[in-house]
Image: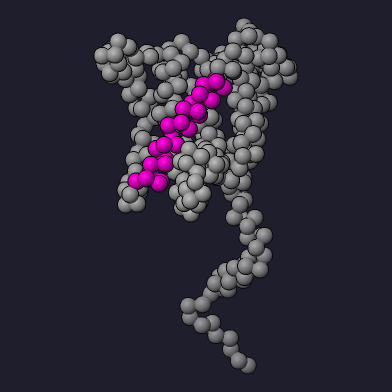
């Protein structure tokens, strides 16, 4: 009889690992499913699960005497959202602020991105991109309170406008729009910069050779190719502005947006706060569906 001798350095675990690797190699769908299981589980349980809990709790009510949540199904919260004028005004004001911030970010970001992508020297472009990203490294609260000091009475804005006989905007809705524009501007610059950087040089030369002036080249060549990236950046600026409440609370004065109402109601009337929270979710979903037609989601 021949004795079976196990060679040193070899184990059954290594053979099992090789067989498992071979099985995964022959089954790419199984390999993809195993790779996506953890992130999909995280997305389903924590993100979609929290949204589902938010939507379900919006149908509950609150005891007016004890402020305790009563798990009885009712549509009173949504009926109140639709019938009480103040909620409609706040919702429309929040959407208007988000749109204003998005438009301002696009207007400011386009020339900056054009300079960083097409005008600046190639060696300086990475440094300019880093400069654009630098504000994102600072604390959110530090930036907001810095703008509070700038916009306050006797602050930097008043000091700069005083020679022209003007004064700063102070605290209020314009201050909130200005601060939110500063906060989310990098999210608009980066996708536009990427789109302009990928723009073929030959298209611009061909447009010039055909006699098109710079304005016509911008309208007919540059803008159609960059518009999906502008829409992609608007997804960030619109959604972040719509759900923000800290900036409005610090520099917005007495202005109220949806986030402020949710924050105010969450301690006393959680079901109503949940119903209010469904409003920006629905608005953002509709906005994403609208931006999907422009090709924005493929540029994120």
Residue 61 x, y percent position in the rendering: 67, 15
Q: Is residue 168 visible?
A: yes
Is 30 magenta? The answer is: no
Judging depth in this view, the residue of 216 and 45 nearest the camera is 216
Residue lying farthest top? 65
Residue found at the very far bottom of the displayed protein: 1
Q: Nearer the viewer, residue 131 or 269?
A: 131
- Location of the N terminus by quadrant is bottom right
- Would you say 59 lies left or right of 101 here? right
Whether 145 is drawn above or below 221: the answer is above
In percent of width and height, residue 73 lies at: 73, 19
On screen, 114 above or below 209?
above
In percent of the image, x 62 and y 46: which residue is there?
40
Residue at the image point whose x is 61% and y is 20% from the top = 276
Extent of the magenta region = 94-120
Q: Quadrant of residue 160?
A: top left
- Res. 190 image quadrant: top left
| 37, above or below 77, in the image | below
Task: Give residue 90's position: percent from left, percent from top.
Answer: 57, 15
The quadrant holding residue 181 is top left
- Which quadrant of the rendered structure holds the C terminus? top right
Residue drawn where x is 32% and y is 52% of the image: 123
Q: Nearer the viewer, residue 296 or 273?
A: 296
Residue 266 appears in the figure: no
In the rendered image, residue 119 lying in the magenta stretch gets the answer yes
How was the colour assigned to the protein in this rendering?
Answer: one colour
SS majority, magenta: helix
Q: Position of residue 7 (x, y in %)?
A: 51, 82
């Amino acid at each position: 009889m021949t004795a079976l001798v196990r060679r040193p350095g070899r184990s059954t675990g290594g053979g099992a690992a090789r067989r498992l690797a071979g099985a995964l190699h022959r089954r790419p769908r199984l390999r993809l499913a195993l790779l996506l299981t953890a992130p999909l589980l995280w997305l389903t349980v924590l993100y979609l699960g929290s949204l589902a809990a938010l939507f379900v709790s919006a149908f509950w009510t609150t005891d007016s005497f004890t402020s305790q949540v009563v798990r009885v199904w009712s549509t009173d919260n949504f009926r109140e959202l639709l019938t009480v004028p103040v909620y409609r005004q706040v919702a429309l004001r929040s959407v208007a602020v988000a749109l204003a911030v998005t438009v301002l970010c696009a207007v400011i970001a386009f020339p900056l991105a054009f300079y960083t992508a097409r005008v600046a020297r190639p060696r300086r472009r990475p440094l300019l991109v880093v400069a654009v990203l630098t504000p994102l490294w600072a604390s959110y609260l530090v930036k907001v309170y810095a703008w509070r000091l700038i916009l306050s009475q006797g602050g930097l804005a008043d000091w700069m406008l005083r020679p022209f006989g003007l004064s700063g905007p102070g605290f209020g809705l314009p201050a909130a729009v200005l601060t939110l524009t500063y906060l989310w501007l990098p999210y608009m610059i980066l996708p536009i910069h990427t789109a302009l950087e990928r723009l073929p040089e030959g298209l611009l030369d061909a447009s010039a050779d055909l006699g098109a002036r710079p304005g016509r080249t911008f309208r007919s060549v540059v803008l159609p190719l960059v518009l999906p990236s502008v829409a992609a950046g608007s997804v960030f600026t619109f959604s972040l502005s719509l759900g923000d409440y800290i900036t409005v609370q610090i520099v917005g004065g007495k202005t109220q947006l949806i986030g402020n109402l949710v924050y105010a109601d969450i301690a006393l009337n959680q079901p109503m706060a949940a119903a209010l929270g469904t409003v920006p979710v629905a608005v953002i979903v509709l906005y994403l569906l609208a931006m999907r037609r422009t090709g924005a989601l493929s540029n994120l």
